[in-house]
């Protein structure tokens, strides 16, 4: 893949409504930055809604344009003329969309427009209008096939493993503090943070494992509920809500934890699962299709039954026992090597370039 060449310089436009801190937005920036070494790449942001940190990570080699539309404003069409004017000037060979309904804005460009589906149960209403639809995992591709009747090639998500420093010290004596991290948007109906809190109640309050501490990183509408649940379960001294943090901040500190837990109730892929593996941590995730697809051949990956807080508590006990027995260092080092070969961001970006060339 490193030797991938195009017959002529591709002109790629990545088009998205918002650039906040979600997985799809981070992936778009990472992919564009890598593709810019082999093609002329632009990112066009439609709405005036973005993370300064994420925009700041866009490479100088990538052309960035912000149309500054007010989110939800359907009356103003000035942004449309700006968008069409930009596209006329750029003359893209491919317009890569990252929201399913962007196709409505591109009536004259449909033959050059592709879409990536970033989640399970995505809306299907516009999918057949795209030249090609890609999926981030086999689980998402299967879902689209069943619900929309569309064959969607899989281009696996990836990360830059070199950006995350791996854990070096795996010493874990009995009764020493066990530090756990969970990273994700605070939407408990999807990300399942309430299950983690209830599992912690069993371990810390009922079973008196008072050496367990958890940091929850992220923001979102469920934050007040989760804080209230933490208070109700009397976990305040053991659970900390750190709020939204930059990816640089997270990557710099991940290896200081003992394990990462992703208790999602719905997950099409699971970038945080990969980030935990890259940091050399044992990773616990629900057996949702996306995380289970990643962890099926990863030695330091542990799956629990989705929605089952008792099974999650049992899995945490199992991982702690393996750490205390000195088994984790070998498993984590092997896992990082396996995952790097399959889920590197360079592989993801170059696979998209190969797909573009076949359009």
Image (cartoon, rainbow, N blue to C red):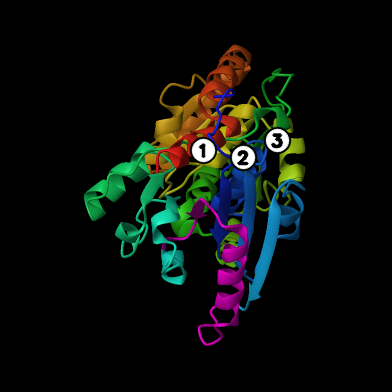
Residues at marks 2 and 1 touching, judged by CB atoms closer than 8 Å: yes
At horizontal 57% and vertical 40% (from top left) the residue drawn is 272
CA gap, disc 1 to disc 3? 31 Å
- In magenta, the rendered stretch is 72-100
- Check disc 2 and report the residue beneath it: 35
* In the foreground, 141 or 358: 358
- Front label number (3 vs 2): 2
CA gap, disc 2 to disc 1? 8 Å
- Check disc 3 and report the residue beneath it: 254
Q: Quadrant of the rendered structure where residue 84 is?
A: bottom right
Q: Residue 99: x and y, percent? A: 47, 60
Residue 154 highlighted magenta (yes or no): no
Q: Residue 81: x and y, percent? A: 57, 77
- Check disc 1 and report the residue beneath it: 353
Q: Going by the image, does 343 lie left or right of 214?
A: left
Q: Earlier in the sequence, mark 2 or mark 1?
A: 2
Q: On the rendered image, what quadrant is the N terminus found in? A: top right
CA gap, disc 3 to disc 2? 27 Å
Can you say whether 271 is above or below 79 in the image? above
Q: Residue 295: x and y, percent? A: 45, 28
Q: Secondary structure at mark 1?
A: helix
Instruction: Residue 30: tell me if it is visible.
Output: yes
Q: On the rendered image, what quadrant is the C terminus found in? A: top left
At horizontal 77% and vertical 48% (from top left) the residue drawn is 60
* In the foreground, 55 or 40: 40
Q: Going by the image, does 137 lie left or right of 278?
A: left
Instruction: Residue 19: tell me if it is visible.
Output: no
């Amino acid at each position: 893949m490193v030797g991938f060449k195009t017959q002529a310089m591709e002109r790629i436009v990545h088009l998205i409504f918002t650039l906040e801190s979600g997985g799809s937005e981070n992936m778009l920036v990472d992919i564009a930055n890598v593709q810019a070494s082999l093609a002329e790449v632009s990112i066009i942001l439609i709405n005036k809604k973005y993370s300064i940190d994420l925009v700041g990570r866009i490479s100088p080699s990538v052309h960035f344009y912000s149309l500054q539309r007010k989110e939800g404003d359907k009356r103003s069409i000035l942004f449309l003329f700006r968008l069409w004017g930009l596209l006329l000037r750029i003359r893209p060979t491919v317009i890569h969309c990252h929201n399913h309904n962007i196709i409505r804005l591109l009536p004259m460009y449909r033959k050059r427009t592709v879409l990536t589906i970033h989640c399970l149960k995505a809306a299907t209403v516009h999918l057949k209008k795209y030249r090609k639809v890609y999926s981030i995992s086999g689980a998402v591709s299967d879902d689209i096939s069943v619900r929309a009747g569309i064959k969607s090639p899989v281009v696996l998500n990836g990360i830059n493993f070199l950006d995350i420093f791996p854990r070096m010290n795996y010493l874990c004596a009995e009764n020493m503090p066990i530090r756990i991290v969970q990273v994700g948007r605070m939407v408990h109906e999807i990300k399942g943070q309430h299950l983690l809190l209830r599992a912690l109640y069993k371990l810390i309050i009922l079973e008196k494992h008072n050496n367990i501490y958890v940091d929850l990183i992220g923001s979102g509408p469920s934050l007040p509920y989760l804080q209230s649940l933490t208070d109700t379960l009397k976990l305040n001294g053991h659970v900390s809500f750190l709020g939204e943090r930059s990816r640089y901040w997270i990557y710099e500190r991940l290896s200081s934890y003992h394990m990462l837990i992703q208790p999602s109730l719905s997950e099409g892929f699971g970038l945080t699962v990969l980030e935990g593996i890259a940091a050399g941590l044992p990773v616990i995730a629900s057996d949702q299709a996306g995380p289970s697809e990643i962890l099926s051949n990863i030695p330091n990956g542990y799956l629990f039954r989705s929605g089952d807080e008792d099974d999650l508590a049992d899995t945490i006990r199992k991982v702690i026992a393996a750490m205390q027995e000195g088994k984790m260092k070998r498993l984590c080092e092997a896992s990082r090597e396996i995952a790097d070969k399959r889920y590197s961001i360079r592989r993801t970006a170059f696979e998209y370039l190969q797909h573009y060339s076949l359009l």
